[in-house]
Image: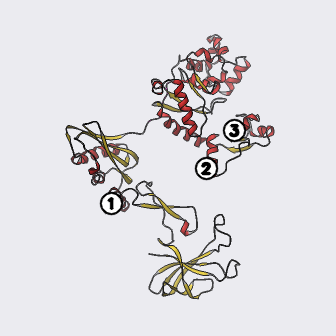
Amino acid sequence: MERWRKIQEQWGNAQPDDQPQALAVGGAHGPVVHAVNRVAHLSGVTTGARVVDMRALCPQLRVDYADCEGDRAALERLALWARRWCPWTAADDWTAEVVSGGHGLVLDTTGSDHLWRGETKMLTQMEADLSMLGFSSRLAVAPSWGAAWALARFGPVRAICHDLADLAPLPVVALRLDAETVLLLNRLGLRSIGSLADLPRLSLARRFSRAGPAQNPLIRLDQMTGHLPEPVSPPDMPPVFRADAKLAEPILDPTHHLPSLCAELCGRMAQAHQGARRLRLTVYRTDGEISRIEVACALPSREPAHLAFLFRDRLERINPGFGFDLISLEAPATEPLGLQQVDLAGGSEAGLEISHLVDRLTARFGRTTLAQLRPVASHIPERAEARGAPMIDAPGQTYPVSERPQRLLDHPEEVRVLYAMPEGPPAQFQWRRRGYRVTRYQGPERIAPEWWQDKSGTRLRDYFKVEDEEGHRFWLYREGLQGDGRGGAPRWFLHGIFA
């Protein structure tokens, strides 16, 4: 729910705080409530209930559909972000298997709590950092995954458990059981973990002998108490591509070792079908200091000669001090790069040569020297493009070239029309004190004003592609129509020139 509210605020669709809000997902008998805000919860709206029933209970309830895939992706990113507290973190998503509980994170903080001066201060820091991201949290520390899961959802806001006997008052749903198993246990009078643990295991084993992990309360109880191990399995970290050169004696210039380092690094990236977008060269000086430089590529690359060339004009920025005996070359940012096939004539790809040129110019003059235009959602020509990010940081993609001219004037320039054809372009016009006679034309292409941002009274445009007697091609437009009630006679402007 909090992620959905943040997205709505970014879109400018933020709902009032007193508006009951629910997110729904598809169910067997219609949409069911997936998440609610605080106002809806106080109004009696519960997760798992049908939306039609909850609307009868709370007529003011606003319902939107949940983005479950987006929530899972955001949770996985948050799990990687949480590695600032400990190295073993994983996303914990049980919403499809249990009655309640929702998304969460599981962290194996064994040996990490002392870095935060104790478990209490560690939980306080976690709560503060998550709050800065706009998320509320319920935190718990326990000897096992199952115990921490139960306390975080059914215990106090911040809980630290050292004695598993404290879990006895929690409801049986805290064992991460599915809805049918919880309903069966409640019908048997087993509503708490303590009452379930007091029963003879043999009778429960017979009843749930064929049940899976999500339906067997004995397996869940053993996982909570630690008798059945449940290790944290974090997602695999992206591979680290790195090549090192350990030197017998300190040196002052890494130039001679750079080609071999690039060749070794490119060989490792080739095995993983990856290409470097950013490279970092680090030298470890004998006095304990570190000096490093970075370069970037416009397209993924694993050509040793090209990558080594990018460092040529930057090696002088390294401060060698009294010398260094270890050189490290790594690729902190990579992208998938398969095998590339040259054309039938044996030549190289033209786009690759352009990317190499961009890399060399950027390495010499800086990242912000070259920039590319980025498309903007507008059909007005002068608004359809804007200066984007540096080309060295842009993703490896190209945009299709439209039928409009590659060169647009900074501002459309008004032309003097000597004679205009009815519903067509001017037969003759004068631009910059020079006359042009139109021999061929194509159009019109009508472009209406953008009413959501243009001023009232803005006139539409009719664009024409025209060609004069000498073969020059221009892009003209007529602003307004005769008798449209938005001004006097139509005016003509030249907006672009075709190559």
Horizontal side of 436 relative to 216 (left or right) equals left
| Residue of label 1 | 348
Q: Nearer the viewer, residue 123 or 82?
A: 123
In the picture, the quarter occupied by the C terminus is bottom left
Q: Is the residue 86 above or below the residue 416 in the image?
A: above
Q: Earlier in the sequence, mark 1 or mark 3?
A: 3
Dot 1, crowdedness within 10 Å: few (<14), some or many (≥20)?
Answer: few
Q: Earlier in the sequence, mark 3 or mark 2?
A: 2
Q: Earlier in the sequence, mark 1 or mark 2?
A: 2
Marks 1 and 3, Cα distance to the nearest angstrom? 58 Å
What amino acid is found at the position of numbered circle 3 in the picture? Answer: Asn
In the image, residue 97 lies at what x, y percent?
Answer: 62, 30
Camera-nearest label, 1 or 2: 2
In the image, residue 458 lies at what x, y percent?
Answer: 65, 72
Q: Nearer the viewer, residue 190 or 21?
A: 21
| Residue of label 3 | 37
Q: Toward which corner of the image does residue 67 lie, by quadrant?
A: top right
Tell me whether circle 1 and circle 3 mark residues in contact (CB < 8 Å): no
In the image, residue 488 lies at what x, y percent?
Answer: 67, 82
Q: Residue at x 27, y 50 (%)?
A: 315
| Residue of label 2 | 10
Q: Is residue 383 magenta?
A: no
Dot 2, crowdedness within 10 Å: few (<14), some or many (≥20)?
Answer: few
Disc 3 on helix, strand or loop? loop
- Range of magenta residues: 231-237
**Residue at the bottom extreme, as displayed:** 418
Res 241 visible: yes
